[in-house]
Amino acid sequence: MIELAVFHNPVEADLARARLDAAGIEALLLNHNTGGLFGGALMPSRLMVLAEDEAEARRLLEI
């Protein structure tokens, strides 16, 4: 898996993952549960996708 994006806001991270899941793209959030302990500043959520899904995921999230 590759890192697609980093989010300091856990709500934005959840929305991005949900959007990818709805499109059939497997996505994983790393540091998501621990990020809330520090407000996302010290440990932001990392959105991960399979390398072969990167281009489509970037297109869907417009990043």
Image (cartoon, rainbow, N blue to C red):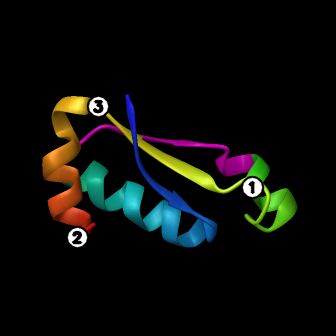
- The relative height of residue 13 versus residue 34 in the rendered view (above or below) is below
Question: In terms of secondary structure, where does tag 2 sit?
Answer: loop
- Tell me what residue is drawn at x 22 percent, y 52 percent: 57
- The relative height of residue 61 versus residue 50 in the rendered view (above or below) is below
In this image, 32 relative to 50: left or right?
A: right
Please identify the quarter of the rendering in which residue 10 is found: bottom right
Region of the chain picked out in magenta, as a range: 25-33
Instruction: Give the position of the N terminus as an image quadrant.
Output: top left
> What residue does disc 3 label?
50
Please identify the quarter of the rendering in which residue 2 is found: top left
Which badge, 3 or 2, comes first in the chain's sequence? 3
- The nearer-to-camera label among 2 and 1 is 2
Please identify the quarter of the rendering in which residue 24 is found: top left
> What residue does disc 2 label?
62
Do residues under tags 2 and 1 come within 8 Å of each other at their CB atoms?
no
Q: Amino acid at mark 3?
A: Leu
